[in-house]
Amino acid sequence: MLLRRRRSHHSMGRRRRLVAGLMALNAATVAWAADAPEPQLGESLGLRPVAPLVAVAREEGMALNGAVFRTVLTASDHEAEVAVKGSCTLVVETRGKRRLAQWLVEVAALDEDGEGFESSTDQEARLFTSTGREHTFAMTKQPVRLTAFGPVPLAERKLAKLTRDDIPRATVERAVTADFLRLGFAGFTRGWIGMLERGVETAPGLGLRLREPYPEKVTQAVAKIAAEAGWTEVDDRAYAATLPALLEFVGVIMKTPAMAEILAEVVDVPWWSVVKRGGKLPPINIRYRFERIRRVATQTASADARQPQDVYVLPVVLLLDGKPALEVDLFVRRPVGGLALVAGVIGLEARDPRDAQSRVLMRVIGVSDD
């Protein structure tokens, strides 16, 4: 019997739960990946909000200092300290058979001493790499305000008739793990590119776990190969940091109104595996496409910045039951200033592995550091 995927309300609910499962993921990342298109500079970095959303952003006083540039410019180049501060303005666009639309999103840090909020630094996250090392990361919480305007249809006829009252608005306040967001991805990608420039092509067996260490026979073999490749403890920690940074970044997106449903549209769910499991979701894992990590641009943060900031692409695959269900290219730079609110991700391209036309694009179009 030929089973066809049917997108009912029931299946969409499962899709949302599946994507939300990333927030509680016990993930393992590996060094291998299936064939996929070579990531270019990225459509997301050229994404521009339509005029009605620009008008909304100006009316709401959102940061738009990066809207006229191909890549976002930040107001300053200082490292985030104890708290994540400022705000980020993002444009999100869906492209596919179901709909073509944009949303405007603002992620704004709130006062960590706000009423009803308790910041705790007692907890730590423990991560284990396949090199045999253990890394701990603090888990300080901080409140943020997440606001979404949209959807705004991109069909010219509908767009021409659109009024301000036609653009829905939704706002929530949530707590995020600021320490995780500040870790970002650029430390790892920069170190990885450095290895490639030294002639090292891959680090076989490189992996990451949340709850338990790898067996000794695995760590001994991987540690030997990693040492020969010049893989240092600093590299190892930067690699380990990418998982909490990724999960927290996904958490910010998932907590933002409408975003969970948008991402669910491009997840290819293996429904037969779900059926065999009695309706339960299959195991979820994350895979980095190590061989396709690369530097894609160099941008100047500001006139008084200490140094230009490199932009890297970090390709990620979400695996369900061992099969690719979502492919994502993250365009990342150092999570400085307000960019720490999104872990330094300035662009994102998510797509269904079986339908390249079904995509979600995201781009930071403005940053405020205070």
Image (cartoon, helix red, strand yellow):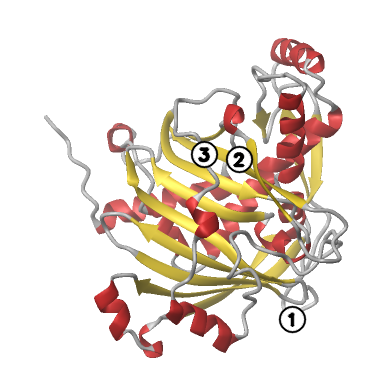
Helix, strand, or loop for circle 3? loop
Could you tell which of marks 2 and 3 lies nearer the N-terminus? Answer: 3
> What residue lies at 55% left-to-right and 60% top-to-bottom?
363
Decide which of 316, 366 is in the foreground and name it. Answer: 366
> What residue lies at 66% left-to-right and 73% top-to-bottom?
65
Q: Is residue 117 above or below residue 329?
A: below
- Residue 199 visible in the picture: yes
- The disc labelled 2 sits on which kind of residue? Leu
Expressed as whole percent of the image width and height from the top left, the position of residue 152 reads 37, 74
Instruction: Give the class, few, some or many, for how many residues have Cα within 10 Å of label 3's Cα (few <14, many ≥20).
Output: some
User: Quadrant of the image for the C terminus?
Assistant: bottom right
User: Quadrant of the image for the N terminus?
Assistant: top left
- The disc labelled 3 sits on which kind of residue? Pro
Labelled disc at residue 314: 2
Q: Which residue reaches farthest left?
A: 1
Q: Is residue 368 above or below residue 127?
A: below
Q: Nearer the viewer, mark 2 or mark 3?
A: 3
Labelled disc at residue 166: none
Provide the residue designation for mark 1: 115
Instruction: Report the number of numbered marks.
Output: 3
Q: Nearer the viewer, mark 1 or mark 3?
A: 3
Expressed as whole percent of the image width and height from the top left, the position of residue 15 reads 37, 50
Provide the residue designation for mark 3: 39
* 56 on left or right of 136: left
> What residue lies at 62% left-to-right and 80% top-to-bottom?
62
Helix, strand, or loop for circle 1? loop
Helix, strand, or loop for circle 2? strand
Q: Quadrant of residue 182?
A: bottom right
